[in-house]
Image (cartoon, rainbow, N blue to C red):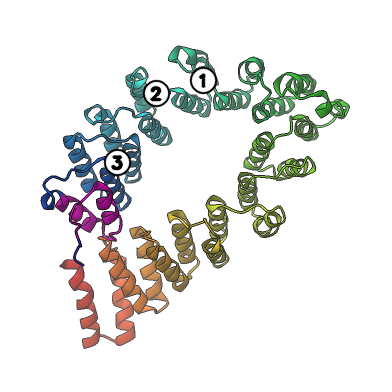
Amino acid sequence: MSIRWPRILTPKQLSQLIQSQKNPLKALQIFDEAKCKYPTYRHNGPVYGTMINILGRSGRTTEMKRIINQMKEDSCECHDSIFVNAIRRYAQAGLTNEAIFLFKYLPEFNCIEWTRSLNTLLEILVEESKLEYVYQLFLENSCGWEVKSRAHFLNLLMNVLCRMKRPDLALHIFQEMSYQNCYPDKESYRILMRGLCEEKRLNEATHLLYSMFWRISQKGSGEDVVVYRTLLEALCDNEEGQEAIQILGKVLRKGLKAPKRCYKNIDLTQCQNGSDTEDMKVLINEALIKGIVPSSDSYRAMAVDFYAEGKIDEGNKVLNEMHARGFKPSVAIYEAKIAALFRDGQVDEAIMVIDCEMVQKNCVPNIRLYNVVIKGLCHERKSIRAVKYLERMSRQVGCVPNYETYETLVDGLCKDGKYIEASKVMEQMSINSFWPRAGTLNSLIQGLCQVGDLHTAIMCLEDMISLALTPDIHVWQSLLDAICCENGMNETSFKTLEQLHTPYHT
């Protein structure tokens, strides 16, 4: 299809033009032709970012690298987010060394800040256990003006050390944070408290808690309760119940700054009457729920934390307390609850939350919550039920399915052998300008051949070719088997094979 070029081209128009292209190589061709057709035109940072994202998303890392180098040569001002996307695409393609190489050469680009790029790269290196690179990158970039905040990195490093069972080193980093011109935040305390408690360094954990009282809990933020609960439960596990009760009293008074009316009716004597560890934990958690200063943030922090740990009953108690105090649970709480129920295999209960509980509480699901439901149903091999939530999402004003929605659903339907339904969802996906991965299309075409829908399989193959994706050898074999099975090895079969062969090699 010929391109209708405007009389005067702007970068915004070019971005829209290349984004509308199904084939990433066609988009690249248009991008390259623009300068030839309009001698006075110059690409800017956003249009480079669009082109880099299109190529990266389609796995065209060689072409993406060329455009990145072209952007450097043009010396146009570019935003940190462009490099964040490029680094992620390199990592997804298994080219972490290219991501490191790109970051090291960022000073040659016209980019004045790269805090997010550094944090993204460090997170990837941590996931891949390349800790020597993490340490080296920190030494090289910890004092540069281009990196505005070091707190995120130091938290990441403490988290790594705690996972390696070295909270002592994490504590050392925590104590040195002020020398890096940054100060511990709530996440710093959460990471370190969990690390110290897991290694039963309860003395240091208790001192950490007291330092938290005067550093970040001076106003009695209810969100801090997540950190306090970690230590209290660790003390119970270590059979130090009496110490836990004493600290609980200080937490309620000094940490949460709860007024007496919030905790004066809490009876802690039950904790002292020979309760076993689990019973004591339940009683302490109930005391924290009733003792915190009532606010949406404090309830949300506790509920989400309980559900993340799989403690569904405790999370439900927080919800009940919220309702009793007149607070409306947020979507984030329901999202955490549904995810916890799916992890626990309680599929029907998870569905009841979105279908009944949220409706009764007048809480409208968002795209993240719908994706959690669809992912949970597909994981439980109930993808047909998941399709209903795609339809429901499409009818909801302001809630548009994204790439993750479609990709999860198509993969789930293929795994369940529902290839016809998967092809219909993929058709919606294409209409909304989301293009599937090669692996998804390979699975779908092979499945359609298995169920005898040769026409749809060939249509999907044409889509695959138009996206400049390479079909797997098994796809060709499946198509050949299906054609021969349907027509026999006759003149019609050879003509069909020739039609498939021609567009792929022209």
From the viewer's perspective, is 421 left or right of 362?
A: left
- The kind of residue tagged 1 is Ala
Q: Which mark is residue 148?
A: 2
Q: Secondary structure at mark 1?
A: helix
Q: Quadrant of the N terminus?
A: bottom left
Q: Secondary structure at mark 3?
A: loop
From the viewer's perspective, is 91 left or right of 501?
A: right
Vertical placement of residue 373 versus 83, above or below: below
Vertical placement of residue 388 versus 63, above or below: below
Q: Which mark is residue 95?
A: 3
Q: Which residues are magenta?
A: 5-34
Q: Going from the N terminus, do you reach mark 3 or mark 2 first?
A: 3
Vertical placement of residue 374 versus 115, above or below: below
Q: Main secondary structure of the magenta part?
A: helix
Q: Residue at x 64, y 15 (%)?
A: 214
Query: Residue 380 sits in which quadrant?
Result: bottom right
Decide whether residue 7 is among the magenta residues: yes
- The kind of residue tagged 3 is Leu
Query: Residue 255 sits in which quadrant?
Result: top right
- 10 Å crowding of disc 2: few (<14), some (14-19), many (20+): few
Instruction: Measuring from the top left, give residue 337's x and y in whole percent.
Output: 65, 48
C-alpha span from label 3 to label 1: 30 Å
Q: Residue at x 28, y 70 (%)?
A: 462
Q: Going from the N terminus, do you reach mark 3 or mark 1 first?
A: 3
Which of the two residues, 27 or 423, is positioned nearer the viewer here? 27
Q: Secondary structure at mark 2?
A: loop
Q: Residue at x 21, y 82 (%)?
A: 495
- 10 Å crowding of disc 1: few (<14), some (14-19), many (20+): many
